[in-house]
Image (tube, rainbow, N blue to C red):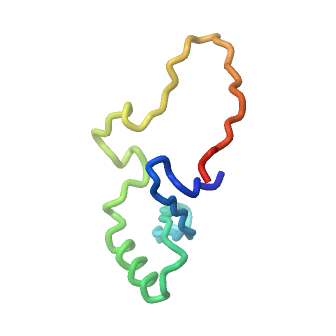
Amino acid sequence: MPAPKCMKDGSTAVAEELETIDLSEDPSVQKPIPISVHLTTEEKENLVSLLKEFKDVFAWSYEEMPGLNPSLVCHTLNIVPGTKPVVQPRRTSTLM
């Protein structure tokens, strides 16, 4: 679904094209990071170099984040077991 062209507060939404780079040196483990496709070659090389230098700062899994409260990262729906789902009508956007 594309981003709306303008937001409720009147600001313009910007969807930037991204490419994913892998910071892992081990092919069996992926450490993907999205970066802009609009960087110059020099900017991209500098950014990738910087990200690789500080890749130990990023958490790649929940296990790497000790003390993280699961209620902050786990989504739950408060529903009564056995309740039949409600199908809502399709909504159309009035923002252009």
Residue 46's x, y, as percent? 39, 83
Q: Residue at x 57, y 69 (%)?
A: 17
Residue 55 in which image quadrant:
bottom left
Task: Identify whether 96 is placed above or below 55.
Answer: above
Q: Is residue 80 left or right of residue 58?
A: right
Q: Name the outermost residue toward the bottom.
A: 42
Image mark count: 0
6 vs 26, nearest the viewer: 6
Rendered view: 81 above or below 93? above
* Residue at 57% in and 57% down: 5
Residue at 44% across, 89% down? 42
Quadrant assignment for the C terminus = bottom right
Q: Quadrant of residue 81?
A: top right
66 in relation to 14, above or below: above
- Does 45 sit above or below residue 2? below
Q: Nearest the camera: 80 or 24?
A: 80
